[in-house]
Amino acid sequence: MRYMLIVAIFAAGLVGNVWAASEGQKALEATISMEDAIRIATQSQPGSKPYEVEMETENGRVTYRVQLVDTDKKKYKVYVDAHDGKIVAKK
């Protein structure tokens, strides 16, 4: 039983390290800064303000998902390509 617990803890540590490496790899692949992505997203929705930003992979490319809210409390998600700064999608 103790052996199973040690194996489970070791496996969880490996998964955590792989996840951290993939997140770090996303950041290394980006040529656009997070600040630039926020600026690009807010310019696409005048009067909006960012409240959350996350780097993720969207359709095989690294993107920043910038969540915005406007003065009417309507929320938007703008996906900005981390390589060229182009808007990939708006939701």
Image: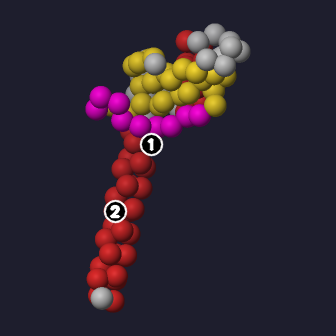
Report the span colored magenta: 52-60
Q: How is the image coloured?
A: secondary structure
Dominant secondary-structure state across the stretch colored magenta: strand
Residue 73 versus residue 82: which sits nearer the camera? 73
Give the secondary structure at mark 1: helix
Q: Nearer the viewer, mark 1 or mark 2?
A: 2
Where is residue 56? Give x, y as percent: 41, 37
Res 36 visible: no
Q: How many marks overall? A: 2
State the CA–CA distance, disc 1 to disc 2.
19 Å
Q: Residue at x 49, y 22 (%)?
A: 78
Assess whether residue 54 is covered by the magenta stretch. yes
Residue type pointed to by label 1: Ala
Q: Is residue 3 above or below residue 87?
A: below
Which residue is at the far right? Answer: 71
**Quadrant the N terminus occupies:** bottom left
Specify the label residue 27 is tagged with: 1
Residue 77 versus residue 21: which sits nearer the camera? 77
Where is residue 34? Give x, y as percent: 55, 33
Residue 84 versus residue 57: which sits nearer the camera? 57
Specify the label residue 15 is tagged with: 2
Residue 31 versus residue 65: which sits nearer the camera? 65
Q: Quadrant of residue 17?
A: bottom left
Specify few, some or many for label 1: CA neighbours under 10 Å numbering under 14, 14-19, or 20 or more.
some
Specify few, some or many for label 2: CA neighbours under 10 Å numbering under 14, 14-19, or 20 or more.
few
Residue type pointed to by label 2: Val
- Position of 41 with respect to 47 (left or right) is left
Q: Residue at x 43, y 49 (%)?
A: 24
For marks 1 and 2, the one nearer the N-term is: 2
Specify the label residue 90 is tagged with: none
| Contact (Cβ within 8 Å) of mark 1 with mark 2 | no
- Position of 44 with respect to 70 (left or right) is left
